[in-house]
C-alpha cells in the first residue's frame, strides 16, 4: 500500500516476456519514469483504477534472474523482498514456458503474495502448443492465468487473478523445489545452519539457495544475522562450493519440469531460421543487410517527423511579426525580444527536433519489438566488442549521421547503463545532418575541390576520435571485469503491438519535450543575455567584450572572436553556424535566433567570409564546429537517457575541449601549408 | 564429448557440464543452459556468436565462452 491507499503491483519477468506490453496496457499514459534512488537504473511506475480500487504498477527492470550480477538484479530482488509491493505479478512466456519459468523458480522462497501470468498465449498457440493451467495452479498454490497482454479486449482473467492473489494473499508453494534441493549436500548443511534465519520476506530456503550459489551480498547478510557460534560453521560451509549455481540451476529446472508436467502439449516441430533470419545473419551479407535496414529505418523516421517539423517551422515564423507588433503596441524591446527571440524560437527549435525523436523512437522501438534488434546485435557483436560495446550500438551510431538526438534516443534498446552512456559519448563524435549541411559548403567555399579531401579527413578523424574516446571513457564506464561475451536470446519475430508502442512512444516524446525544452530555454537565455545589446551594435555585447579579451587564447586554436563566437553558438545548433557568422559580419539579426533557426544569411556572406577569414582559420573553424557538441537538444537527450547530470557534463566538456584541440591542430597544420 | 564452440551447424547433443567463473555460470544458467539440456547448433560462423537452440529458444552465445560448455553429441527424435 502507498500512503495514498493505493495497492502496489510489481511486475517481474525475464526480458521478452511481454512485460512492457502489459504495463502499457494497464496504465496507458499514466506513467512516470524516474530513477531508482542512488542508481542509474530507470524506475517506471504507472497507475490505473479497477473496480473502484486504485493501483500503482511498478515495472521492475527485466532481468534473467534474481542473483547479484547487476544493479538491475539487486534492485529487483531488494524491492520484492522489502514487501513494498502488495502483490508480485510474475510473467512467463508461454511459448518458451520451461525456460522463462526460471524467474519463478529463482523467486521461490520469497514469501510475498504473488500470481503467475503465462503471457503470449497467442504465440504459443501459433506454435502448436496447448497449455492447461489447472494442474500448474494446484502445484504452485497461486493464481495462474494464461492470456495474451496484446488482447486488450479480454483482461478479465488477469484482473480476476490479481484480485484473488490480493484477497487470499496467495504465497508460492516451494515445497517441490525444496525437495529437489535436498539432493545437494551443501544445501542441506547450509539450510540446517541457518534454519529460522530470514531477511525481510526472504525465507531461509531462499537464503540457503543463494548461499550455495556464492551470492556475496546474501552471504554477508546471513553472517550478520547469525550468532557468533554458528557464523564460523556457516563460513566454512559456504566456502569452496563448486559450481553451486549450476547445481541449484539443475534443481530449479527439474522442479519446473515437474510443475508443468502433463500440462504442456506441443506438436514437435523442428525450428529453423526463416528466410529473413538467414539473410540478416549471413556470414558475408549480414552486415550490409543490417546497415541497409537501419538506413531504411532512418528514412522511415522522417515520415512521422515531418508534421512536427512543419508545425515547428510554422511556429518559427511567429517571432518576427510578433516582435514588430509588440513594439508597435509599446511593449519594451527587451521583453519583446525575450519572448520572441528566446521563448518562441526555442519552442520552435525543440518541436522540430522532437519530430525526429518521435520518428526514431517509433521506428527503432518497432524494430526492437518485432525482434530485429537482437539480430543486429548478433551481427555486430564482434565489431562493437572492440569498443567495449554491444552489437546494438551500431544502430545509434548510424542514426547519429542524421541526428545525434535521435541516436541518443536510440540507445534506449541498450540494456547496460555503462554501454549506453559510452555509446552516446561515441555517437557525439559522428557529424550530424546539420554539420553535413554546413561543413561541405564551407569547405567548398574556402578550398574548392580540396573540400573532398577535407571531408575524407573528417571521416578519418571521426573514427580515431571514437576509438580514443572509447579508450578514455570505456575504462570507467564499462569496466574490463564487466565486459562479457554475448548471452542473448534471439526472440521469434512478433507482430508489432501498435497501441502499446504508440503509448510508449508518445510518453517518451512528451518526457523528452519537457526535459529538452527546459535545458534549451536556460542555455539559450544565458547565451542571449550575453549577446544582447540594446543598441543592436554587436560590439557592445558582453559576448563581444569577452570574446575580444580572450582572443589571444582562442587564436591558439585558430579562432578570432567572430569565429569563436560562432563556435560557441554552434553548441546550440550547428545548422546555425553560418547564420551566426552572417549576423556577426553583416550586423543583421540576433545570434541566438540565427544559431537555432539556420536563418537566412546575408547575400554577400561568401564574400564577407573570404575577406575576413584566412584559410588556416577556416580549416580550424570547420574542425571546431564538426567535432563540437552536436546541439543543446542532443545534450538534453543525453541527460534524459543517461539519467546522469555528471556524465552529461563530462561528455559536453570533453567535446568542447577536444573540438578546440582539433581546431588548434588543424590551424597549425594549415599555417604550414598556406 | 566436445565443447559447444567446436560444434558445427545442425549438430545436436546434451550439455554435460558448464564451467567458468561464478558470474558466467549464473548468467548461462538463468538463460536456460544447464547440464542435461538438449542443444542444437543453428549457426556457428567464424568471428560471430554461436546460435544455439535449446528449451524452445534461440540463444546467441559468445564464441570463446562456449568452450566452457561441454556437450555429449547425439541426435534425438521425440
Image (cartoon, coloured by chain):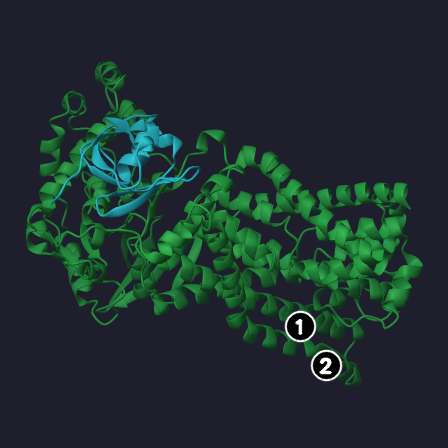
Chain colours: A green, B cyan
Please determine whether, in this image, residue A673 is positioned above or below residue A94. above
Please state the horizontal and vertical placement of residue A562, each as a whole percent of the image. Answer: 86, 56
* Quadrant of residue A572 within the rendered picture: bottom right
Q: Is residue B12 left or right of residue A357?
A: left
Cβ atoms under marks 1 and 2 closer than 8 Å: yes
Please state the horizontal and vertical placement of residue A204, each as a whole percent of the image. Answer: 18, 31
Circle 1 is placed at which residue position? A344
Chain of the residue under the numbered disc 2 shown in the image: A
Numbered label tally = 2
Circle 2 is placed at which residue position? A322
Please state the horizontal and vertical placement of residue A573, each as a whole percent of the image. Answer: 69, 60
**Who is closer to the viewer here, A380 or A250?**
A380
**Who is closer to the viewer here, A149 or A549?**
A149
- Quick one: label 1 or label 2, which is nearer the N terminus? 2
Chain of the residue under the numbered disc 1 shown in the image: A
Please determine whether, in this image, residue A249 is positioned above or below residue A355. above
Q: Is residue A405 left or right of residue A595?
A: left
Residue drawn at x 56%, y 54% is A398
Alpha carbon distance from label 1 to label 2: 10 Å
Query: Is residue A35 among what the camera can see?
Result: no
Q: Dot 1 lies on which element?
A: helix
Please state the horizontal and vertical placement of residue A144, each as a whole percent of the image. Answer: 14, 55
Q: Is residue A654 left or right of residue A614?
A: left
Please determine whether, in this image, residue A277 is positioned above or below residue A283. below
Mark 2 crowdedness (10 Å alpha carbons): few <14, some 14-19, many ≥20 = some
Quadrant placement of the N terminus of chain A: bottom left
Amino acid at each position: 500500500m502507498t500512503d495514498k491507499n493505493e495497492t502496489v503491483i510489481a511486475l517481474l519477468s525475464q526480458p521478452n516476456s511481454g512485460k512492457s506490453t502489459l504495463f502499457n496496457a494497464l496504465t496507458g499514459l499514466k506513467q512516470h519514469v524516474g530513477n531508482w534512488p542512488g542508481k542509474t537504473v530507470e524506475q517506471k511506475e504507472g497507475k490505473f483504477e479497477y473496480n473502484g480500487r486504485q493501483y500503482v504498477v511498478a515495472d521492475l527492470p527485466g532481468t534473467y534472474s534474481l542473483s547479484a550480477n547487476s544493479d538491475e538484479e539487486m534492485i529487483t530482488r531488494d524491492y520484492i523482498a522489502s514487501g513494498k509491493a502488495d502483490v508480485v505479478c510474475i510473467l512467463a512466456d508461454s511459448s518458451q514456458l520451461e525456460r522463462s519459468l526460471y524467474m519463478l523458480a529463482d523467486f521461490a522462497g520469497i514469501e510475498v503474495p504473488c500470481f503467475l501470468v503465462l503471457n503470449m498465449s497467442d504465440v504459443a498457440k501459433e506454435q502448436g502448443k496447448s497449455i492447461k493451467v489447472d494442474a500448474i495452479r494446484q502445484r504452485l498454490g497461486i493464481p495462474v492465468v494464461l492470456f495474451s497482454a496484446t488482447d486488450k479486449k479480454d483482461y478479465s482473467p488477469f484482473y480476476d487473478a490479481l484480485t484473488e492473489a490480493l484477497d487470499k494473499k496467495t504465497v508460492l508453494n516451494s515445497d517441490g523445489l525444496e525437495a529437489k534441493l535436498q539432493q545437494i549436500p551443501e544445501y542441506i548443511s547450509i539450510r540446517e545452519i541457518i534454519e529460522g534465519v530470514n531477511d525481510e520476506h526472504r525465507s531461509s530456503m531462499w537464503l540457503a539457495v543463494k548461499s550455495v550459489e556464492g551470492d556475496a551480498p546474501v552471504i554477508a547478510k546471513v553472517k550478520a544475522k547469525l550468532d557468533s557460534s554458528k557464523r564460523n560453521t556457516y563460513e566454512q560451509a559456504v566456502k569452496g562450493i563448486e559450481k553451486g549455481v549450476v547445481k541449484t540451476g539443475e534443481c530449479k529446472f527439474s522442479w519446473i519440469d515437474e510443475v508443468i508436467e502433463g500440462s504442456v502439449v506441443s506438436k514437435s516441430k523442428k525450428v529453423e531460421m526463416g528466410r529473413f533470419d538467414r539473410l540478416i545473419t549471413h556470414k558475408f551479407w549480414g552486415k550490409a543487410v543490417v546497415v541497409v535496414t537501419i538506413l531504411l529505418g532512418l528514412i522511415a523516421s522522417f515520415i512521422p517527423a515531418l508534421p512536427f517539423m512543419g508545425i515547428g517551422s510554422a511556429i518559427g515564423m511567429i517571432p518576427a511579426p510578433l516582435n514588430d507588433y509588440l513594439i508597435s503596441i509599446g511593449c519594451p524591446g527587451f521583453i519583446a525580444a525575450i519572448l520572441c527571440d528566446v521563448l518562441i524560437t526555442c519552442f520552435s527549435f525543440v518541436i522540430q527536433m522532437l519530430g525526429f525523436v518521435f520518428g526514431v523512437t517509433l521506428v527503432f522501438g518497432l524494430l526492437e519489438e518485432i525482434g530485429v534488434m537482437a539480430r543486429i546485435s548478433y551481427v555486430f557483436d564482434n565489431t562493437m566488442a572492440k569498443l567495449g560495446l554491444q552489437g546494438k550500438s551500431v544502430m545509434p551510431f548510424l542514426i547519429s549521421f542524421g541526428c545525434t538526438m535521435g541516436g541518443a534516443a536510440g540507445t534506449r534498446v541498450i540494456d547496460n547503463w555503462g554501454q549506453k552512456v559510452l555509446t552516446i559519448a561515441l555517437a557525439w563524435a559522428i557529424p550530424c545532418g546539420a554539420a553535413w549541411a554546413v561543413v561541405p559548403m564551407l569547405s567548398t567555399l574556402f578550398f574548392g575541390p580540396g573540400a573532398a579531401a577535407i571531408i575524407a579527413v573528417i571521416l578519418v578523424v571521426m573514427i580515431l576520435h571514437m576509438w580514443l574516446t572509447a579508450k578514455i571513457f570505456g575504462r570507467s564506464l564499462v569496466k574490463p571485469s564487466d565486459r562479457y561475451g554475448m548471452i542473448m536470446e534471439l526472440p521469434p519475430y512478433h507482430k508489432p503491438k501498435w497501441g502499446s508502442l504508440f503509448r510508449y512512444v508518445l510518453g517518451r516524446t512528451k518526457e523528452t519535450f519537457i526535459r529538452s525544452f527546459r535545458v534549451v530555454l536556460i542555455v539559450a537565455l544565458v547565451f542571449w543575455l550575453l549577446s544582447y545589446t540594446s543598441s543592436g551594435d554587436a560590439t557592445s555585447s558582453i559576448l563581444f567584450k569577452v570574446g575580444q579579451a580572450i582572443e589571444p587564447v582562442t587564436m591558439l586554436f585558430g579562432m578570432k572572436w567572430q569565429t569563436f563566437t560562432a563556435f560557441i553558438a554552434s553548441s546550440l545548433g550547428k545548422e546555425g553556424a553560418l547564420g551566426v557568422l552572417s549576423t556577426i559580419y553583416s550586423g543583421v539579426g540576433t545570434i541566438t535566433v540565427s544559431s537555432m533557426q539556420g536563418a537566412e544569411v546575408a547575400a554577400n556572406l561568401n564574400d564577407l567570409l573570404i575577406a575576413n577569414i584566412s584559410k588556416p582559420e577556416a580549416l580550424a573553424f570547420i574542425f571546431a564546429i564538426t567535432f563540437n557538441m552536436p546541439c543543446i537538444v542532443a545534450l538534453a537527450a543525453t541527460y534524459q537517457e543517461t539519467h546522469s547530470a555528471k556524465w552529461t557534463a563530462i561528455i559536453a566538456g570533453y567535446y568542447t575541449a577536444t573540438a578546440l584541440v582539433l581546431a588548434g591542430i588543424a590551424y597549425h597544420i594549415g599555417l604550414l601549408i598556406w | 564429448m566436445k565443447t559447444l564452440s567446436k560444434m558445427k551447424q545442425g549438430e545436436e547433443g546434451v550439455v554435460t557440464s558448464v564451467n567458468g567463473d561464478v558470474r558466467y555460470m549464473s548468467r548461462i544458467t538463468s538463460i536456460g543452459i544447464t547440464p542435461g539440456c538438449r542443444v542444437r547448433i543453428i549457426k556457428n560462423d567464424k568471428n560471430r556468436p554461436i546460435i544455439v537452440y535449446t528449451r524452445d529458444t534461440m540463444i546467441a552465445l559468445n564464441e570463446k565462452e562456449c568452450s566452457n560448455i561441454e556437450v555429449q553429441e547425439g541426435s534425438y527424435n521425440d
